[in-house]
Image: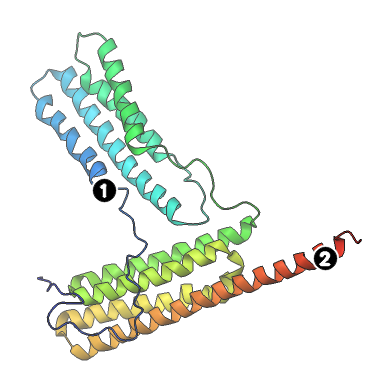
Amino acid sequence: MNQRYGGKYSPGARPQSGATTQPPLHSARPARAGARVNLLFLLPFVLPLTAFRQGPVGLTADLVAFGLLMLAAWLTREGEKAHEAWEARAIARRPAIPRKIFGSVLTALGVGLAAWAPGAGLTAPLLLGALGGVLHLIAFGPDPMSDKGMEGIDSFQTERVATAVAEAEKHLTAMREAARPVADREVMDRIDRFAATARAMFRTLENDPRDLTSARKYLSVYLGGARTATEQFAQIYGTTRDAAARTSYVALLDDLDTRFAQKSEALLSNDRDRMDVEIEVLRERLAQDAPRA
């Protein structure tokens, strides 16, 4: 289905009343799993093209090397996604499986096996395999090997926040996927803007897990309702193109964006209040312990 291009300054653009003026990608960075990772999936296809020109041993070696390199590319892509998620969060645990390191090892094995030929020595394949593994590790870097931002924080509270945020992220992803077939650029922009506002709340909760109780309704009830409303809107608008349904859904997104932004500001205000209390208590203690003339 064709999608009409439009933007803020396009002809016939609708004013975005009630929504925040903050752009949805104000803090976005280029995805780590980009063109470099996609290239890893293309290069191994040279092996099947040449494998069938060799004998049974060479054929088997090339096909096994192709499988190892494809598995290495998949592990690298998943490792880059996990690394990106680790960087985006203020509090995060290191990935349980070092996927990129395993990808480097499999790349070394795949390159070495692809360079080997029946009856030839092992020196050149070992050197080329080691070189391929080292270059892979240099290009993509190792996986995060330590937890981040968890010093002095109750692990139980941190796990609760991590679980709640993971479920909330599923709702945001489902919203975007449900609205994609509608092919309405303005609706997708509104969803992205709301998702950016919601993720700002997630980062606030990760910084101070004590706020989870007051925000749990936003992460479960409100986001779950928004997901259901998006699915129903996509079903109705995708078949009828009902302008009233579109207007109601856009108004809902604007209201959600405003409510989540206000809640984030309230959480930050609570953090500032706690900081002010700690500062005041510390000043009183310093005044009591100060040496008297």
Residue at 7%, 22% (x, y): give it. 53
Pinpoint residue 219: horizontal percent, then vertical percent: 47, 72
Disc number at residue 34? Answer: 1
Q: Secondary structure at mark 1?
A: loop
Pinpoint residue 248: horizontal percent, then vertical percent: 28, 88
Going by the image, does 20 lie left or right of 268?
Answer: left
- Please tell me in which quadrant of the rendered image residue 116 appears: top left
* Location of residue 128 with respect to 189 vertically, above or below: above
Residue at 62%, 67% (x, y): give it. 210
Label 2: how many residues lie within 10 Å, few (<14), some (14-19) or many (20+)? Answer: few
Q: Nearer the viewer, residue 281 or 61?
A: 281
Disc number at residue 287? Answer: 2
* Location of residue 256 with respect to 206 vertically, above or below: below
Query: What's the amino acid at mark 2?
Result: Ala
Query: What's the amino acid at mark 1?
Result: Gly
- Please tell me in which quadrant of the rendered image residue 200 appears: bottom left
Residue at 64%, 74% (x, y): give it. 273
Pinpoint residue 161: horizontal percent, then vertical percent: 54, 63
Pinpoint residue 195: horizontal percent, then vertical percent: 36, 70
Quarter of the figure that contains the C terminus: bottom right
Q: Secondary structure at mark 2?
A: helix
**As drawn, which residue projects farthest toward the front?**
293
Quarter of the figure that contains the N terminus: bottom left
Q: Nearer the viewer, residue 195 or 219?
A: 195
Of the residues under marks 1 and 2, which one precedes in the sequence?
1
Are the residues tagged 1 and 2 within 8 Å (C-beta)? no
Q: What's the CA distance linking mark 1 and mark 2? A: 56 Å
Label 1: how many residues lie within 10 Å, few (<14), some (14-19) or many (20+)? Answer: few
**As drawn, which residue projects farthest toward the bottom?**
244
Between label 1 and label 2, give the one nearer the viewer: 2
